[in-house]
Amino acid sequence: MATCGQFKTTYREDIKVWKTLWLKSWFAFLFMLMILFPILNPADCYLLYITNICGIAVIGSIGLNMLSGVTGQISIGHAAFLAIGAYTSAILTATLKFPFPIALIISGFVAALLGLVVGLPSMRIKGLYLLLSTMAFYFITLYVLVHWKSLTGGVEGIEVQTKIGSFELDTDLKFYFLIMPIVVLLTAFARNFLHTKPGRACIAIRDRDIAAETIGVNLFKYKTIAFGISSFYAGIAGSLFGHYIGWITPEHFPFSLSIEYLAMIIVGGLGSVLGSIFGAIFIIAVPEGIRLISHFLSNIYPDVIMKFIDLKGVIFGLIIISFLVFEPEGLAGRWEKIKIYFKNWPYAY
Amino acid sequence: MMLEIESLWLNFGGITALSDINFSIEEGKISSIIGPNGAGKTCLFNCITGIYKTRMGSIRFLGRELVGLKPYQISKLKIARTFQNVELFNKLTVLDNLLLGRHNSIKSSFLMSGIFWGKACSEETENRRRVEEVIDFLEMEKWSKHIVGNLPYGIQKRTELGRALSMNPKLLLIDEVSSGMNAEETEDMSRFILDIKEEMGITIILVEHDMRVIMDISDWIMVLDFGKKIADGPPEEVKKDPMVIRSYLGG
Ligand SMILES: Nc1ncnc2c1ncn2[C@@H]1O[C@H](COP(=O)(O)OP(=O)(O)OP(=O)(O)O)[C@@H](O)[C@H]1O
Ligand SMILES: [Mg+2]
């Protein structure tokens, strides 16, 4: 049926998450799916592993999107905050014997604090210069990780244990039920943030900072908040990642990881929470897909696999460029268009 | 006097954009600033709202000195403005643009907003109500859910006025109401401006090129030329001023 808009009795309904019964049932369905998903695939550890990695990437990409997509402060230092989260958590649990949940939260805050420091110059510098300063921060972080051997284990890295009391998180399934609630919570926070005063203020800074300031937005305050939240999310994602894979080295946080996160928010949709989720899944899933296909093809043409592996980066790059050219609003933008299409179906508009 | 400006100077390198400007604005009136292109009208607005830092002089609003304050601090004193080249948040809806005008009135911290707890929720609703009033007043219900960047220029201008009104200002600065608008839109705008003064009791400073609009609705006019004040007074007086006729009205 074609609807020409809904009638809202109160404004409150308009800003609520659960606008319609339709949406409610969707969320209920998704929720069930999330719980049943791993139980229905008990044997398939690979799929569960990819799902967990996607969940962690979703947290990180929402964080970056809050800063770069929403507030317009482009950062290519995101990998540094992931690393800071991972190492803080590792050191707290291994050396200082902190319980894991507390270490997880602290690593978020440590990353956020350093994010604030990196954000300080954003009042004076913009665009490319800010980009360079985030890059500089990344390389300083990497230098410290490699050279402060007594703390970080240098290039060999450091082991990460995950214990809550005597309970050990040692399977993909247990991690699934740890990661997913955190993903849901942080997604909800980001969504609320975005649709209320602070989110609007950040978007205003991105679109027109002078006009934003004349209506009362304190640029310094909101840029700082954006840096803080973004690196908090990265810190949490980094900590989860470290605990999940069990051993971290500086090589887990290459510069290209920052670029990958930027790709996620570009492909998914700048400034959109849903886009961050789509983008993270896409960027994790596509290389895995390419790998699977090349694996499959190598059974038929044995030498094709080498060529495919060489081409992986190229294919990846082409996908990102096509998004920039053909779908600047990303997957989230496409999703909106599809939704509108079905809402008005069978009419064209 | 609501706004008092005393010996205000503004320089850009070698250019003097404003030299020794003195005037005051009476509460509850529409005061207009006219002058040829480059006279310094927009610069004056930028000084009042703190975007440009002045070298010398004083700007007092309800007894408080504005020179030295940041734009966001000045906005808290309830001074709102529109821009000559529409400065809207293009990717947002009309509604969200207007809600941004409520920025100062929403007190919840970002953490509260993020968990959407307690006051954060009710505040959004309350402020939404105020914004809907402004939307009704400006007769733009049918645009309220549209992305503002895609709307016609006339509607964008109106949205900008709406954003300023949402701030519940005491003083409203309007830069070029009618530029780029057709006759009908200009008439609508003049009507809105008169209503803003009469129904809402907001003091207005207007920069405008259309002399008909100016003469129709102004209570007081100041004429600028090359950064200097060359005349001021009620419309009938300014119209007759020989200096004004020579340099602006074009004889
Ligand atoms: N940021 C700036 N840097 C240098 N010069 C400036 C700047 N802003 C304004 N000016 C100069 O100050 C003078 C006054 O400009 P202003 O924009 O105030 O004129 P105006 O009266 O608003 O003109 P118009 O009717 O064209 O809008 C002009 O000569 C302009 O070139
Ligand atoms: Mg101007």
Image (cartoon, rainbow, N blue to C red):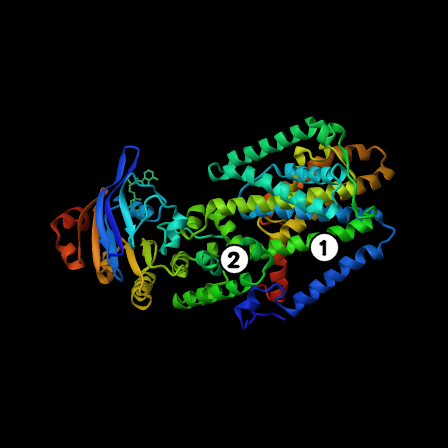
Q: Which residue is mark 2?
A: B108
Residue A7 vs residue A278: left or right?
Answer: left
Amino acid carrying label 1: it is Pro
User: Does residue A277 appear in this view?
Assistant: yes
User: Does residue A47 appear in this view?
Assistant: no
Q: Which residue is mark 1?
A: A181
> Is the residue B90 above or below the residue A250 in the image?
below
Q: Quadrant of the N terminus of chain A?
A: bottom right
Q: Quadrant of the C terminus of chain A?
A: bottom right
Residue at the spot 68% in from the left edge and 33% down from the top edge: A254
Residue that extends furthest to the top in the rendered view of this protein: A147
Amino acid carrying label 2: it is Ser
Q: Nearer the viewer, residue A158 or A270?
A: A158
Distance of label 1 from label 2 (alpha carbons): 26 Å
Secondary structure type for disc 2: loop
Q: Which mark is residue A33?
A: none
On whether disc 1 and disc 2 are found on a single subunit, the reply is no
Residue at the spot 67% in from the left edge and 48% down from the top edge: A59
Q: Which mark is in front, 1 or 2?
A: 2
Q: Quadrant of residue A343?
A: bottom right
Q: Residues within 10 Å of mark 1 (few under 14, many from 20)?
A: few
Q: Residues within 10 Å of mark 2 (few under 14, many from 20)?
A: many
Q: In x, y percent, where is residue A296?
A: 84, 42
Q: Does the beta carbon at disc 2 come under 8 Å from ligand 1?
A: no
- Give the letter of the chain under mark 2: B
Q: Nearer the viewer, residue B21 or A88?
A: A88
Q: In x, y percent, where is residue A291?
A: 78, 40
